Image: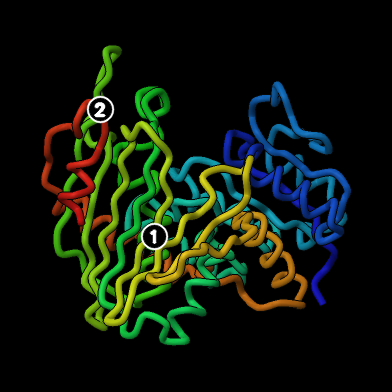
Amino acid sequence: MSPPAVPVILGYGRAGRDLHHRSLGVLAERGSVPAAEVVVVDPVRPLDPLPGARWLRSLPEALATLDSPASAVVHIATPVSGRTDTVRALADAGVRRVIMEKPYASTPAMARELTTVAREAGIELLPVAVWPSSTVTRHVRELLAAGRIGRLVSLHFEQSKPRFRRGLDNGAHSSAFEVEMPHQVLLALHLCGDAEVTDAEVWPLRTPAGSARALGGGGLRLRHRGGVISTLVSDLTSPTRIRRLRLWGTEGEIVAHYPIGGDDPFGQVQMTGQQDRTLCPDAPLTTFIDDSYRFFHGTGERPDGADPQLHLRVTELLAAASAAAVPRGAPPLLGPTDVHAHWE
């Protein structure tokens, strides 16, 4: 049995504070994780920490406050650059349980190095896999396994939202393929198996205040080994938030809508010929973290999609898509309709 968990969050930006810490708070209320303080590691003191945060400036300071580094469950929510050094430092300090926010790595070489370092150090490294942990996805998998739409032929997944300010201000990303696409490619591989990129394109983000090449959105197609074609679209100039999965089979279609935000944690699934939609209470990141802690405690299985080798493959496919991507003009001023039609 593993030692009791002490949550340690490295990086207290949006992902660390608003995603990981909030999920830990929900799980603490349920009794799924310890309700004690969450150790927050960030070189800058948080201006508005969530309740229970205990801030420390550096990782060595944080680990020194623990009875044992082996008790830590470290959530890496720092920018992707420098993560290999972070994992090495954790390994040298005796940390053996790590959850890593997406994207897993910026290049295939970095992903391979991360995977090797973690494996050789004996670290259980769980890359965040949000959509495979979703209640919506689990319901879709059950429908597919039951043959409700016959043989799966194609998949279309759109994850779009307006991201103008962050696109211009955030230097962490250089392409739309680095924002939502890691989640989308992971889900496509999770549902349909390994694949290769057939084509891809990106478009710029343009505002009166400036522009950013390749950060307006992107689309790519995958041909899976079983013959299924996946089309993935992410428009970061979209006027609305969309998280919609469509699957076509030889005998029908499934349309699934994921929650568009944490303020209303419900998804919906509908099949061809059904008038009613199935409502799915859904908080996928919270579910993933809950499953991760159960796995670390030895009371549960590895969370769906949390395999470093699978995330390495996602990184390889995104690198191939970026290399093959054809630039195109911005989507229409009043909406992305013809962009989506092009990718359907």
Residue 91 appears in view: no
Q: Which residue is mark 1?
A: 245
Residue at (19%, 37%) from the top-left corner? 203
Is the residue 272 above or below the residue 200 in the image?
below
Residue count near mark 1 (Cα–Cα under 10 Å), binned few <14, some 14–19, many ≥20: many
Sequence-wise, which precedes: disc 1 or disc 2? 1
Q: Label for residue 334? A: 2
Please provide percent x and percent y for residue 83.
50, 49
Question: Which disc number belongs to residue 185?
Answer: none
Q: Secondary structure at mark 1?
A: strand
Label 1 to label 2: alpha-carbon separation: 23 Å
Residue 271, compared with residue 107, is above or below; it is: below
Secondary structure type for disc 2 = loop
Name the residue type under label 1.
Answer: Leu
On screen, residue 325 versus residue 167, left or right, reads left
In this view, the residue in front, 70 or 241, is 241
Give the residue at x 21% y 50%: 322
* Quadrant assignment, res 283: bottom right
Q: Position of residue 42 (x, y in %)?
A: 65, 33
